[in-house]
Amino acid sequence: MSGLADPITLAGSEVTIPALGVGTWAWGDRSTWGMGGYDAALDEGTITEAFEASVDGGATFFDTAEVYGSGRSEQIIGQILAADPERAAKVQIATKFMPMPWKLDVRRSLMASLRASLDRLGLPAVDLYQIHGPVSLRGQGALADALADAHAAGLVRAVGVSNYSVRETRSMAAKLAERGLSLATNQIEFSLLRRIPETGGLIAACAELGVVPLAYSPIGQGRLTGKYSTTNKPQGRRNFSDHPMEVVEDVVAVLRRVGEAQGGKTPSQVALNWLMAKGAVPIPGAKNRAQAVENAGALGWSLTAEQVAELDRAALVKVGGLAGLKTRMWQHG
Ligand SMILES: NC(=O)c1ccc[n+]([C@@H]2O[C@H](COP(=O)([O-])OP(=O)(O)OC[C@H]3O[C@@H](n4cnc5c(N)ncnc54)[C@H](OP(=O)(O)O)[C@@H]3O)[C@@H](O)[C@H]2O)c1
C-alpha cells in the first residue's frame, strides 16, 4: 500500500518535498515543551544533530513559524543553514504568518512579518509560506491578496494555510485562483489520536483540490512513541492529543504489533507511515539525533492495506470529555 509519491511537488511551484518533513516548534521554544517549560536537554548542539540526521535520512522539509519561541526557531534554523551550506542546499523551508485579529492591515502586516522571518532565516525566499490559522478578522480575499503580494515580490515560492476546515480550504483555494495562484498545503492536526481530518472529509477535499495535507503532531506530541505511559506521562504543556494514557496505550499496543510484523519498525515509524498511506506529509518534531534517525526510518517502506485497516480500527475518531474537546479545538502551535 503506498500513499504519496516521493518527492511531492507543491502546487503552483517547482518546489518538491519528501513524503516526510520535520517540525521545529520545540527548537528554541521556552513555554510549551519540556518539564515545566524549556527542555534542559535541548540545546543548539542537539538541535544541529537532529537537523543533520534528518537531512541525511531524507527528511529535508522543515516547518517553522514566526511564533515558535517568538522567532527563536527561525533564528536557530538560520544559524544552522549558514554554518552548513552543503546540507542547506538540500532543504526546503516553510514558515508561517500569524494573522492575529488586530492585524487589520493584513497586506502590510504579512509583508512585514515575512521580511522579519526571512531575516532570521537568512534566506532570500521561503519555499512555502502559510497562514497559521483562520483567526483573521479580514476575509480570505484580503489574505489571498497579501500572499499574492509576497509571491509577486519573489519572497515565497508556494503558499499554504493551516488549521483550515473544508469550507475555508475551498474558499482560500478559489480566492488564490482568482489571483493566479494555487493553494499548495493545509497543515492540520492529524494522527492516530486524531482521525477527524479523514473521517470529516478534509483529506478527500485536499486530494480533489491538489492541496497537500501536512500532518502536525503526527505522533501525538510524543505519546505514540510508546515511551510514555500511565505512570510516566509527558511533561510540559502538550495540549494536542491530550488523551488519558490508558486510551493511548491501547493504540500503541496495535502500533507495536504492526511494527513487529513489518520487521521491527517502531511505534513512531508505523504511526508516521500510516499518515503517508493516507496521503499526508507528516512533520514530526525531532529534538535530537536519535529521534531524527528514528523518524526518518518511516521513509522507504509501506504498510499493507490490511495493516492500514487494522490501524484505522484502533485510531481515535471520537473522544469524550475534556480530552475530546481539547483535541477538536485549534490551538496555536
Ligand atoms: N500549524 C499548527 O498550528 C501546528 C500545531 C502544532 C504543531 N505544528 C507543527 O508540527 C510539528 C510537529 O508537531 P508537535 O511537535 O506538536 O508533535 P509531534 O511531532 O507529534 O511530537 C514531537 C515530540 O515527540 C517527541 N519525539 C519525537 N520523535 C521521537 C522519537 N522518535 N522517539 C521518542 N520521542 C520522540 C519529542 O518530545 P519529547 O522527547 O520531549 O517527548 C518531540 O518534541 C511542530 O514542530 C510544528 O512544526 C503546527
Image: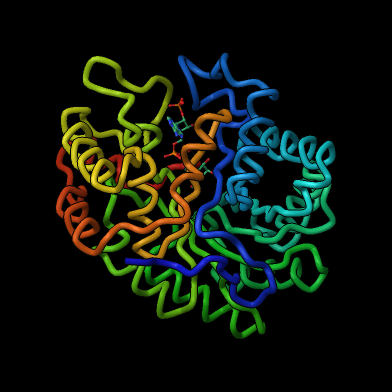
Residue 92 x/y as whole percent:
68, 56
Q: Is residue 206 visible?
A: yes
Which of 179 and 10 lies nearest the eye of the viewer? 10
Residue 6 x/y as whole percent:
53, 66
Residue at 27% of width from left, 57% of height from top?
A: 196
Residue at 31% of width from left, 44% of height from top?
A: 263
In this rendering, position of residue 307 left or right of residue 124:
left
| Total residue callouts | 0
Examine the image and state in which quarter residue 153 appears.
bottom right
In the depicted structure, whether residue 250 falls above or below residue 213: above
Which of 10 and 19 lies nearest the eye of the viewer? 19
Q: Quadrant of the N terminus?
A: bottom left
Residue at 42% of width from left, 26% of height from top?
A: 237
In the depicted structure, whether residue 57 falls above or below residue 40: below
In the depicted structure, whether residue 113 falls above or below residue 67: below
Residue 136 x/y as whole percent:
54, 57
Which of 102 and 56 lies nearest the eye of the viewer? 56
Examine the image and state in which quarter residue 179 appears.
bottom right
Residue at 24% of width from left, 36% of height from top?
A: 252
